[in-house]
Image: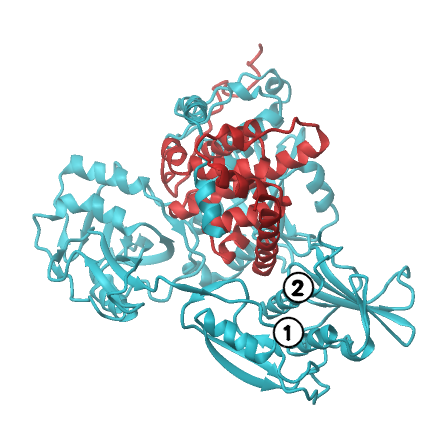
Chain colours: A cyan, B red
Amino acid sequence: MDKKLKKAAEKITMSDQLRDRILDQCNNASTKENDGSIEISGVERVEHKPISRIVAAAAACAVLAGGVGMTAHLLGRNGAPADEIEESSETETADTDSLFDFTGKEYSITDVEKDTELESSDQITAFLNCMDWGEQKDPDIYAGYYSGLQQTTHIEVRDRDKDYFYYINIAHTIATPPAEGETGIVMVTAKETDDKDWADGYYAIDLDTLTVFLGDEELRQDFGMKNLWPDFAGTNFSINGWGTSVDADKMELANIGEAIDALEFTPLGEVPEEYGQDSGEAWHLSSDQNELVLFPSGVAIYHKNVINQDSSLTNIYNTYYTYDYEAVSEILAPFTETNDQREITMPELIGMQHELAEDQLRQLGVNFETAYISTDQTKPGYIVETKPAPGNTIAPGDKVMIYISMSDISATVENYLGMKEEDAATMANYSGLKVIVEYAPGYSPQGTVIGQSLPANEPVETGSEITLTVSNGEPSTLENFPPFGNLYKMGCFINGSEFASGDETLCLVSDILSRYDWSNEEADTELYKDSEVLYFIDTIVNEAHRIVYFYDDGTVEWLETQDLAANNIQMHRYNDIDGENNDLVFQLCQVLDELMPYNQLTE
Amino acid sequence: MNTAEYSGNDPIIIQQVNNSGVRTGSVRDAVESYGDTLFRLCLIMLRNHADAEDAVQETFIKYMQKAPNFTDSEHEKAWLLRVAANKCRDLIRYRSRHFTEPEEVLGNIPALDREDSHILEALMELPEKFRLVLTLHYVEEYKVEEIAQLIGKSPSAVKMRLSKGRKLLEEKYRKEYL
């Protein structure tokens, strides 16, 4: 069935006309993009001078943070005709007027909560320049958000040449929970020095990163945020690594510099623990007093140094990145061939357990890729083949591949809950699983499967172990009851269908529920509305309704009330943090899906 | 047009000073590599050729304009799929308010035989949320966790949709085409 679907779907392909049309469209867009500069001829700009400048600055900033495209949006929204706007992907020019380019500006940072002031420094400038300010937010919404918030940080930036200054006010967001990376709200207010005009812009930022960075002097020395380093193209720098220097003339160096500048460096939020183990094989690019070290592990460090009076170096800060080591090796390989090389020979790995083999390669400092292939010649998880073959030399930049055997046949786990022990064990065995049976107290009749360790409907490797928990028919402890009670005794309505007390379905439902840890409870007064209710169970205890909701994201909540319409009903909620209750809802729903073929709620 | 008031009266120059490097590939490469995948998804989601073509086109234009720097081709593909899936959802929403002619979608694809058409028709008759996860899982072979990340749902929600969707698909296929 699945294969049939894949086979059929893969016959759907896009027509050549569509392909050409898309490429045409994109080409049109990109020729505009490479033009070099943007000229905006908007009458509005003239009439609202300060605003247009801020918009331009904000737009430039959006390009910095958000890439091409947003600029056109920002400018388009403020009156400039969108089709006259073009963006450049060329390198920086002096005319770039970015709101968030702090280089060369006078600014001060005030921690409003602590009432302390921070002077500007090169490093903070770099940090602020590179911070992800995100895209500009809809002012209609954010102005409402922002008003009345307690500020945490206030930055005041002055640009003497340009006759205006701006405030950057930062506060905690009021969104609960905040979106990822948007824990803070930024309001940027730009202003002419003569108090004439104001323009506001709103952004959402990761407030923690900012406050931690600004608040902790020590951390600032060693924080792994992105930093701008000068482009290598056009500067004097030297390269060495692998115990050798790269022998390149000026022309070639310029090319190398350009190629390195074009590489993608992704800033790391944390310093990886083992980045420098393979330092012997690292490339060092030294420019003036600063140095970029490119480790084979794919981590790069930029050391920002200053030269002291006694011509020694002091490290100001380091920034960490991930990057493509192979790409660097490729760039540098042509210049290193003639040099003395540390040669690495491909070890004999075939027939070795793959983790051991990978360890061995890592110890040699070899970058490699793994691929799985189906074969019955080698046990699953063992190395079948390597490229290059054992005994051959690996040059830096060579792509090393190891091929790992995997078993071709996969077994399918089914839903065994509610089945008799023998039937379930036979079925699981037949599907190629290794069955382990354990007995536990349960409300279900003796011999009923009430738990399974592998989720149903997922392929696993043949021979995988599955533990089936089987009821011994003796409900023993009461402490494992879910806090909303014992359904088995009470009887209930599940999605409106009635189940009498002692019903076998209820026994099974109770057994599944009682096998989970119900200790992480949260009290809440609001009904959870983010997800879809899959099942709800309604019982009546002491004339009050006790209703349990099971949501499709694994959240479970319950309430007890005599009057559902009453306000301020307290909900008890279990957000699944560790994913265990995810499985619970999943298992429960599978059982109920089978028992209640017509589910009025979800169909 | 009066530009005299504008200080310096030089054009505002805006540059992409994206220091972290260049995009991994050109649009042409992306269209070549992922065009079919995206078109397939959009057609299954939208059940209409013209809409699917629009969705794919808009996805690539967005790629041109706003694509982030990708860590690898998988990242790139996932980004494109997510954008395309969102585009489809927007279009479906739009369509629910505006009437569109129903279309014999699969009749236009000569490569499909009867059996292929039947199973795809069965798939296209499922509710939208099942179509998406089933296509990503069984056609594009994404794992549950990856789909969860891609569509912004929890893994268990994806698991549930997969399991239910599969059941519904089988029922439909058996009942109507066998």
Where does residue A516 sit, x and y in percent of width and height? 64, 76
Residue A66 visible in the displayed image: no
Q: Which residue type carries mark 1? A: Gly
- Spot the residue most to the top: B1
* Vertical side of A515 occupied by A96: above or below: above
- Residue at label 2? A594
| SS label for mark 1 | loop
Q: Is residue A68 left or right of residue A447?
A: left
> Residue, x 67% and y 32% (percent of image)?
B95
B25 to the left or right of A601: left
Q: Dot 1 corresponds to which residue?
A: A418
Asked if residue B149 is positioned above or below residue A424 in the image, the reply reads above
Taking depth in this image into account, of B46 and A432 the one nearest to the observer is A432
Q: Viewed as shown, does residue A398 lie left or right of A303?
A: left
Residue drawn at x 27%, y 37% as measured from the top left = A258
| Tag 2: amino acid | Glu
Q: Position of residue A157 (x, y in %)?
A: 55, 41
Could one spot residue B125 in this view of the protein?
yes
* B151 vs A148, nearest the viewer: B151
Q: How many labels does the image show?
A: 2
Residue A267 is labelled as: none
Given contact means CB atoms under 8 Å apart, are the residues at marks 2 and 1 in contact?
yes
